[in-house]
Amino acid sequence: MLESLAHVFQPLASKQFDLLLIVYLVAITTEAMSGALAAGRRNMDIFGVAVIAFVTALGGGTIRDVVLGNFPIGWTQHPEYVYLVILAGLATTLLARFMHHMKSAFLMLDAMGLVAFSLIGSNIALQLDYPVVVVIMAGMLTGICGGILRDVLCNQVPVVFCRELYASVSLFVCALFIGLRSFGIDADLNTLLCFILGFGFRMLALRFSWKLPTFSYQQRWD
């Protein structure tokens, strides 16, 4: 499976990026499980669980590729990703009763996945020669859109817009990656720095409940 990922993400295919590739696999598995839990909270059937798990794990990359015109979409060429996320989602239905003990681990894995997705999305846009603003948006689409699709399908406000800093972390990682690249920082070192700083930023946001200012407007237009 790592060989398949290396083929899809050729810019990340060096030995130095083995860790990032592994994190990608862990991330889509974790995201699939979070999607399954969200489906369970909405009392969905097994088919619904599988769909939400798939959308949560692979939806961000799919939206990115459609927006960028990057075809064929990765998972269509590598069905093992589909098997992995659906199996993870279905396994969650059996393990859900034990998962409240794993909340901290889930949050850490989710933070790692957010950073990895953001970096992968940015790299793909760079290889397609898109301008800087599009590269950043591509990274953010990859990082946050799976969770947004999950929450929309589960009929709730996406948590990335109303909880501890999440989308902002993706923006930070993508902007930092581009900034360091513009200064000629080695690509491997750049990715490592962005990964460490992005992961640390997200964990600090969780620890200290950092949030952006909220906007509340209740007045009716009668």
Image (tube, rainbow, N blue to C red):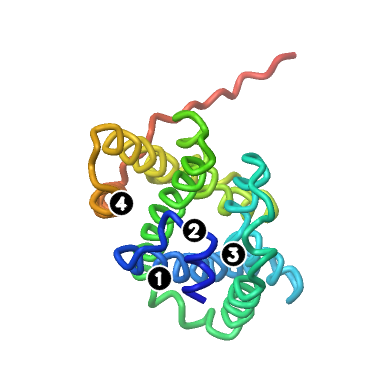
- Is disc 2 surrounded by few (<14), some (14 to 19) or many (20+) residues within 10 Å? some
- Element at label 1: helix
In this rendering, position of residue 88 left or right of residue 77: left
Residue in the picture at 31% in, 46% down: 209
In this rendering, position of residue 16 left or right of residue 10: left
- Element at label 2: loop
Image quadrant of residue 44?
Answer: bottom right
Q: Nearer the viewer, mark 2 or mark 3?
A: 2
User: Mark 1 to mark 3: distance in Å?
Assistant: 20 Å
Q: If you read the primary sequence from the N terminus, does the residue marked by circle 2 or circle 1 appear first?
A: 2
Near-viewer residue (198 or 95) = 198
Q: Which residue was labeled with disc 3?
A: 35
Above or below: residue 15 compared with residue 87: above
Near-viewer residue (47 or 4) = 4
- Is disc 4 surrounded by few (<14), some (14 to 19) or many (20+) residues within 10 Å? many
Residue 9's disc number: 2
Residue 59, horizontal then vertical, whole percent: 63, 55
Residue in the picture at 40% in, 68% down: 106
Q: Which residue was labeled with disc 4?
A: 191
Asked whether the beta carbons under mark 2 and mark 3 sit within 8 Å of each other, the answer is no
User: Mark 4 to mark 2: distance in Å?
Assistant: 14 Å
Q: If you read the primary sequence from the N terminus, does the residue marked by circle 1 or circle 3 appear first?
A: 1
